[in-house]
Structures are given as C-alpha cells and as structure tokens.
Amino acid sequence: MITLIKYELDKLIRNRTFLITSILSLVVIAGIFLVGYYYSQVSYVEQTNADKGYPEFYSDTANEYSGDFDDQKVREILTDYMDDFQSEADEEKRPFDVFSWYIGETFFPKEGDIHLEMNEAMGNGEKITFDQLDIRSIQDVGFASFDKPLKLGTYNTWGDLFLVTSNMFLLASMFIIFICSSVFSSEVSSNINQLLLSTF
C-alpha cells in the first residue's frame, strides 16, 4: 500500500498541471496575504500617519489605552479622541486615530454624525465635549458580561489575519479538488481505471 501511495505521489508531482497549478496557487496566496494582511487598513493608516509625522500612531494609541474594557476606559478614550480631533483644524495635518474611531463608532450616539458636528463647532469657534453627548454604556451597547473584565488592546490586525487565513483555506481546498479531479480524469482518459477496477 505504501509503495502504491509513493508511486501515485511521484506521478502527481511529475504532472505538468500540478506544477503549474502549484506555482499559480503560491502567487495567489502571496497576493492574498499581501493585500489582505500587509496592506490592511491598519497598515495603510499607519503609513498615512507616518507621512504626516506620526509614526507608530496606531500602536502607541492602542498600547496607551490597553487594559480593562469598562465605561471609564471608554470615557477616557473618547474624551481624548474628541480633544485631539478638535485641536487640529486642518484635516491634512490631523492623524487618523483608527483605534479610537472604532470605539467611537460603537459608543457615539447613532443619531447624526459626531465628526460633522465637531467640524461645524470648530468652524464656529466652539468645542463639543464628551459630557454634551449621550454616550451609551457598555451594557447599553450589548456587550456580554464576564467574571473577568474584557481586555482592550490592538485587535484589528488579528481580524485581518483570520480573514486572510480563511481565504487561503478556500484556495487550498480548490487546489486539492482540482488536483484530485485531474488525477482521476487522466486515469479515465487513458483507460487505466479499468485496470484498477480489476484489482478489487
């Protein structure tokens, strides 16, 4: 049995279709990894912020606010985010704080756009503070409660990695199906399957 498996694997490796498909699959996997993970949103934002003079901005922000995820932490993040946003009127010079932005998307009131409101207030020489908004609590948002509190930190790149891994798994599945079908179809076309069936 082992000899037969070795023979089949050797025959498979010598197949030109297998070699071409393997090379194409490696190129596609590299492309999926490059686009889906390396050039993910965080990487792009980090590069844009570095060009504005804020290198490692996302990492520094995530490390600064890492810890227990509670209402006080949300208040701290969003207060600093609103202060930083309104301290720089020029959008071209303002770094994009993707970490705090995701927190804001979850906890800011859903009515209206807080960023437009802050820009309008800045245009009038005013400033919107955290206390002026009806910020929802963690319980209001619907987060589950646990015996130990949730930890806050860098999370976006893990999501990108899982997405890329699932795409790679789909590609690997298609590659295996294609190779197996080509092996069986080649045996049928050369009538070797008749010989194999006679051995049962």
Image: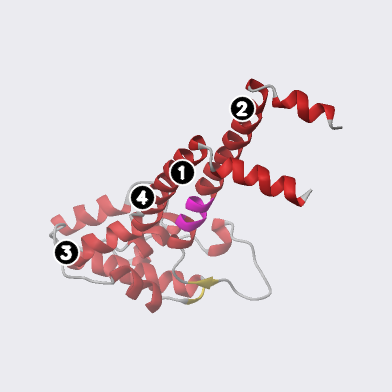
Type of the residue with mark 2:
Ser
Residue topped by disc 2: 186
Label 2, label 3: how far apart the Cα atoms are: 55 Å
User: As rendered, which of 186 and 119 lies closer to the eye?
Assistant: 186
Considering the numbered disc 4 on the image, is that residue within a helix, a strand or a loop?
A: helix
Residue 196 figure quarter: top right
Residue topped by disc 3: 51
Q: Main secondary structure of the magenta part?
A: helix
Residue topped by disc 1: 25
- Where is residue 61 drawn, in percent x and y? 34, 73
Query: In this rendering, which labeled residue sits more in front, label 3 or label 4?
Result: 4
Considering the numbered disc 1 on the image, is that residue within a helix, a strand or a loop?
A: helix
Residue found farthest to the right:
200
Residue 13 figure quarter: top right
User: As rendered, which of 168 and 72 lies closer to the eye?
Assistant: 168
Q: Residue at x 53, y 42 (%)?
A: 14
Residue 31 belongs to the span the image colors magenta = no
Query: What residue span does the magenta drawing correspond to?
Result: 160-165
Q: Residue at x 23, y 71 (%)?
A: 55
- Crowding at mark 3 (Cα within 10 Å: few <14, some 14-19, many 20+): few
- Crowding at mark 2 (Cα within 10 Å: few <14, some 14-19, many 20+): few
Which quadrant is the C terminus positioned in?
Answer: top right
- Where is residue 127 drawn, in percent x and y? 22, 64
Residue topped by disc 4: 35
From the viewer's perspective, tell me whether residue 176 is left or right of residue 58.
right
